[in-house]
Each structure stands twice: as C-alpha cells, then as structure tokens.
Image (spheres, rainbow, N blue to C red):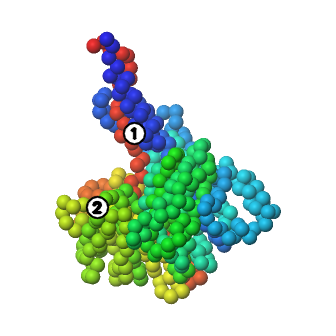
C-alpha cells in the first residue's frame, strides 16, 4: 500500500485557505523554521472590503481613504498586487419606500442608471504603495456602494474609510464607517423602528452570483414577525438598501437587526437617521460573547444609551463597568442589566463619562454564568439643535495590529482600553496622502483603564493619514477613534473601532518533497 499523509496535509492547508476566503497558500520563505506538520503564520494574499452607498442626500460629500501598513506583504510572484475600490454595478431599493425615487421622472431615472453604469468598474481609489494612504471622493445621493479587493503586498492589513459630511437636513452629520469584509452573519443592536428614526440596512454583494439574505428584527418583547425580510436578493456586484420600518408594523425605540445569508455573502451596515440628533453608521457588533467591551465614549457625551441582545436560549445578567482614566468603577444607578433571551434590552446611561473619556465593559453578574450577548452604544454630544449622534458597537481587541484611516491634522482622538492586564502599544501615524513623514509613539495603559490621547501627526503632513496600533506587551487592548468636524457651529462626530486586521492566517507547513511514501 501507498501512504498519502503528505498529500493529505497539503489538502488540509488548501481547504483552510479556501474557508478563510482571504489567504492563498504559499511555501514559507527560506528563513522559516517551521517543521512539516506544524502551523505557520503567513500574510494573507487577498482581502475584500465593501463600502455601503453613502446616503440619500443630494447635499452629501463623501471622502474615501484606503491604506495598507508597510512591511506586511509576502514574497513570490503575487508580491506586487493591487488594491482598488470600484463602484458597484448599481444600488437599488428592496422592500423599501424611497419617496425621492418615486417622485423622479423616467428621464431622471434613466440618467441615473447611465451614470451608475459609466462609473461601474472604474476605481474610485487605487492604492499605489503600502504605507501611504490613497484618497477618492463622491458627492450626491446617487453615489453607489464600493467593492474593493487587495492582493499581494497590499492585502495584509488593508483598510478603507468612508466619511460623509451632510451639512443640513434630517440626515445631517459626519457619517463614518470602516469598510467591512463580506460575511454571512451580522448583529446590529441599537437600530430602531421609531417614528423619529429612518434606519436602512445596506447590503453589498462582492461576488459574481446573486446572494440571498434574511433580515430578522427583535424588539423589547421579542421577535418582530415579518415575511418581507425573508429571501432578499442582492444581485451580483451590487448594493441593496432596506428601510427596516417597512419590515414590521411595530414601532420600537430599541431594535436588534440580525442579517444572515442563505446563499452567498454580503457586507452589511445600518445607516441611522434621527429628526433631532442627525445620522451615522451603525456597524456590526463583535460575535456574541459573555464579556464585551465598547471602547471610546467621548468625555463630553451628553447622552449614552446601551442596547444589548442575548441570541441564545438563556437570559443574560450583566454587570456594568466604566473603565476611565484612573480605573474601573460601577456606575451608580446602572449596576446591572437583565437581558431576556431573544429580547432587546436598553438602558439610558445619561452623561456617564462626566467629562472624562471612558469605555464600557459588560461582564457576567455571576461568575461561571456567562451568557453570550451582542451590544452597542448610542452616543450623543451637544444639546438642543446642536446634538449629534454616533454609535460604538462591541468590538474585539486590536490583537497584533489594527488600523484606522482618514485622520486629519486636527479632530482625531484615539481611545485605548486595557480591560484586564496592563499593556503597552505602539501607535504609528503613516505618511500623509499628499506627503509627510511617519512617526510613532508608545503608550502604556494601566489595567482596567482607558487612555484617550490626541494621536501623533506625521511630520510635514499633507492630506489625511492612517493610525496603526500594535500590541507590544501585556493584556488585550481595545481601541476606537473619534473623528470630529465642526460644521455650521455643530461639532459633528463619528466613532470607528479598531479590531485586529487579521493580516496573517495560520496554515500548516508542508515539505517541498511531495513524493508518495511506502508504508
């Protein structure tokens, strides 16, 4: 008999690469010491990112920034690579009531479709080199979703930021989102079907075949039944937006949106808009977990609302801890939150930070009884007609490395939280999109605290730049970036979390000798 153990190992490695959707298997470089049968970490060779259609306002101006950190690429023929954000074929409405399109005459619709077709396939942003951001822009309500792919040396750690400014109207605000990777399962606490809200789920399909998605809604009393949210087709290379209030007849202030796919994969995000506080993007919460961290509550937050959901069969009893500058405290009057299974729970934390930036950590009230939850914060700054809103979902730690793009010379704040052991991180400000020299700075974060800093700025900065956070030692660190821009006397802001960029993937190492061996 012949043994096929070597071939089986290779087959397993190829299967792993296929499952991740991001990595292509390469032989480790000559300096690798990994033995056959052991795991090695290799840079990913292909990464996908999806940016939702910017908005519904003709007054919107959108900036795109793409970036890949230096030094993360792999060798071989694929090393050169590319990184581009392309316009999707189109962006349609599904099960939604878009009044602006209903009023448009046939000629306007044809002109819009022609404009979208002309834009499709043309790069909005094309990255020229790792370590230096590339930018692009769009304007108006007709801007489509973007579909991006990075390969070779551009793939590890590739990130893209979409930042939209709407100066006036119900949807006013600074809307920011780190473009997301395609997936098959997303949780969005803190959405709403209230009369004062207009929340859309944006679905973007990067692939050459149609995807089919389901949208489930859960309110304070459980599932909001609707057949309309089932079997939503997202055409190949296109975006679809769904007004969630059309999926149910019930109005609820706090709603959890669950997006899954039956076939294919999508990028998903929720665009919220409120009559009083403006609009922003709500990105997906981290996967359900017993302990979750929500980093980067601004020091001057005037209102903070926590929304949580327990997707399993057990109720969750959560203790709240505010991680501030000097340590962790239990907010008076907000010590615990009970979340019933398959029901959305909300709690007003008011001005919980009281002038000191912080982060919120949810932990099991009883040790040994950790019930997985998803969570998000709705954060408001300002008062009266100068209020603005942003969202902070639960997020994973920065891990080895995390990056956020589109930082400016002024208006950026970086929050670093060490929920467990103390930690040290290195923060690198990249070169600017128009010029400048990178700079780095090291920060030490004490256990159970949040450090909010004005991040380093590249020397001689021109344009925008990226911030990369790398864990140097100690426990896990969670991070978020707040971007602020004053428009018409209003401090508009948006918050992006910084989870691990997953720029490497673990694959089994294989010997070069692939000969079949005798038993």
Residue ID for mark 2? 314
In the rendered structure, the answer to whether residue 150 lies left or right of residue 36 reads right
Residue 26 is at least partly visible in this image: yes
Q: Horizontal and vertical percent for residue 497?
A: 42, 63
Query: Residues under labels 2 and 1: Cα distance?
Result: 39 Å
Q: Is residue 227 left or right of residue 16?
A: right
Residue 329, percent across and down?
A: 24, 75
The quarter in which the N terminus is drawn is: top left
Marks 1 and 2: in contact by CB < 8 Å? no
* Picture layout, residue 92 above or below residue 452: above
Disc 1 element:
strand
Q: Nearer the viewer, residue 83 or 496?
A: 496
Q: Position of residue 117 (x, y in %)?
A: 72, 52
Residue 355, visible in the rendered structure: no
Q: Crowding at label 1, few (<14), some or many (≥20) Cα neighbours within 10 Å?
A: many
| Residue 264 vs residue 273, the one in the foreground | 264
Say above or below: 510 vs 236.
above
| Foreground disc of the pair 2, 1 | 2
| 10 Å crowding of disc 2: few (<14), some (14-19), many (20+) | some
Q: Which mark is residue 359?
A: none
Residue situated in front as seen by the camera: 510 or 320: 320
Q: Secondary structure at mark 2?
A: loop
At a point 43% along the width and 37% down the height, the residue shown is 17
Question: Which residue: 29% across, 73% down?
Answer: 337
Q: Position of residue 216 (x, y in %)?
A: 47, 60
Residue 105 falls in image quadrant: bottom right
Q: Residue furthest right?
A: 107
Quadrant containing the C terminus in the rendered view = top left
Q: Name the residue beneath numbered marker 1.
A: 42
Give residue 347's quadrant in the image. Answer: bottom left
Q: Earlier in the sequence, mark 2 or mark 1?
A: 1
């Amino acid at each position: 008999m012949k043994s096929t153990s070597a071939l089986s190992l290779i087959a397993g490695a190829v299967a792993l690469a296929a499952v991740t959707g991001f990595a292509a298997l390469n032989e480790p470089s000559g300096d690798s010491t990994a033995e056959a049968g052991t795991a090695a970490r290799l840079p990913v060779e292909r990464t996908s990112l999806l940016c939702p259609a910017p908005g519904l306002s003709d007054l919107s101006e959108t900036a795109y920034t793409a970036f890949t950190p230096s030094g993360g690429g792999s060798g071989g023929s694929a090393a050169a690579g590319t990184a581009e954000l392309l316009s999707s074929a189109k962006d349609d409405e599904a099960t939604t009531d878009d009044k602006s399109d209903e009023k448009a005459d046939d000629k306007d619709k044809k002109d819009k479709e022609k404009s979208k077709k002309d834009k499709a396939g043309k790069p909005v942003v094309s990255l020229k080199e790792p370590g230096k951001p590339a930018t692009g822009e769009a304007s108006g309500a007709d801007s489509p979703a973007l579909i991006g792919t990075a390969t070779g040396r551009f793939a590890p750690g590739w990130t893209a930021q979409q930042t939209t400014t709407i100066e006036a109207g119900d949807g006013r605000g600074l809307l920011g989102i780190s473009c997301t990777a395609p997936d098959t399962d997303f949780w969005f606490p803190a959405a709403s079907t209230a009369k004062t809200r207009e929340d859309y789920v944006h679905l973007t399909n990067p692939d050459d075949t149609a995807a089919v998605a389901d949208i489930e809604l859960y309110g304070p009393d459980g599932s909001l039944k609707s057949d309309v949210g089932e079997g939503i087709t997202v055409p190949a290379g296109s975006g679809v937006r769904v007004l969630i209030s059309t999926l149910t007849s019930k109005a609820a202030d706090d709603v959890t949106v669950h997006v899954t796919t039956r076939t294919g994969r999508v990028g998903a995000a929720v665009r919220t808009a409120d009559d009083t506080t403006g609009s922003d993007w709500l990105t997906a919460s981290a996967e359900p977990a017993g302990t979750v961290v929500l980093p980067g509550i601004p020091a001057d937050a005037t209102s903070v609302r926590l929304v949580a959901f327990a997707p399993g069969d057990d109720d969750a009893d959560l203790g709240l801890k505010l991680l501030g500058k000097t340590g962790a405290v239990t907010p008076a009057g907000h010590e615990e939150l009970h979340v019933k299974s398959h029901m959305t729970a909300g709690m007003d934390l008011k001005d919980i930070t009281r002038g000191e930036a912080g982060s919120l950590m949810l932990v099991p009230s009883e040790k040994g009884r950790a019930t997985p939850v998803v969570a998000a914060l709705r954060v408001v700054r300002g008062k009266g007609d100068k209020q603005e809103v942003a969202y902070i979902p639960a997020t994973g730690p920065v891990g080895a490395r995390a990056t956020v793009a589109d930082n400016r010379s002024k208006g950026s704040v970086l929050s670093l939280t060490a929920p467990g052991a103390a930690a040290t991180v290195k923060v690198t400000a990249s070169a600017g999109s128009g010029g400048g020299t990178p700079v780095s700075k090291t920060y030490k974060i004490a256990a159970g605290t949040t450090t909010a800093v004005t991040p380093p700025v590249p020397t001689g900065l021109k344009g925008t730049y990226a911030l990369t956070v790398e864990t140097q030692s100690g426990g896990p660190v969670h991070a978020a970036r707040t971007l602020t821009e004053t428009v018409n006397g209003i401090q508009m802001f948006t918050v992006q979390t910084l989870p691990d960029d997953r720029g490497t993937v673990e694959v089994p190492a294989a010997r070069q000798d692939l000969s079949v061996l005798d038993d």
